[in-house]
Structure formats: structure tokens, C-alpha cells
Image (cartoon, grey):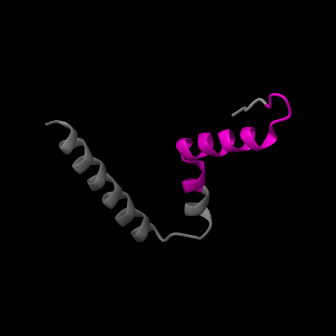
């Protein structure tokens, strides 16, 4: 990932970089990997996320 700094506007470039990383899911991945997650907990979390996605998709089809 690359962000160009224009006219020494470092704060603006950092803001853009943080936004890109958040959209990419990098921050979520870092938080998730900070501690060990047991396989059973991981499976439950993934099922919960899949259910959330299915409900969201079914709401959009109206």
C-alpha cells in the first residue's frame, strides 16, 4: 500500500493511510491476532460473522 505526501502535508497523508488500512481490514486483523484464539472460539466467531453477512445480504435484496 502506498500513500504519496504532497507539499509536506504529512498529517493528511497519515489520515489517508489510516483510512485505507481500516477499509482493507488490517487493523481488525491486528487486533484479532494480538492474542491466541482457541479453535472452538474461532469457529463460533466465524459462524457469527457469516450469519451477520447473510442477514445483511437478505436485507439488501428488497
Q: Quadrant of residue 30?
A: bottom right
Q: Quadrant of residue 43?
A: bottom left
- Above or below residue 37? Residue 8 is above
State the residue in front, 20 or 1: 20
Q: Horizontally, is 52 left or right of 35 in the view?
A: left
Residue for point 43% across, 64% down: 42
- Residue 18, percent across and down? 65, 46
State the residue in front, 39 or 59: 59
Magenta highlight: main SS: helix
Residue for point 68% across, 44% down: 15
Q: Quadrant of residue 8?
A: top right
As for residue 12 lying within the magenta part, the answer is: yes
- Where's the C terminus, which quadrant? top left
- Residue 17, percent across and down? 68, 41
Residue for point 55% across, 62% down: 32
Residue for point 32% across, 60% down: 48
- Residue 34, percent across and down? 62, 66
Q: Horizontally, is 62 left or right of 45 in the view?
A: left
Q: Horizontally, is 57 left or right of 25 in the view?
A: left
| Highlighted range, magenta | 5-29
Amino acid at each position: 500500500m502506498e500513500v504519496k505526501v504532497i507539499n509536506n502535508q504529512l498529517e493528511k497523508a497519515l489520515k489517508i493511510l489510516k483510512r485505507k488500512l481500516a477499509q482493507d481490514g488490517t487493523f481488525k486483523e491486528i487486533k484479532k491476532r494480538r492474542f491466541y484464539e482457541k479453535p472452538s472460539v474461532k469457529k463460533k466467531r466465524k459462524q457469527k460473522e457469516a450469519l451477520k453477512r447473510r442477514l445483511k445480504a437478505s436485507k439488501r435484496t428488497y
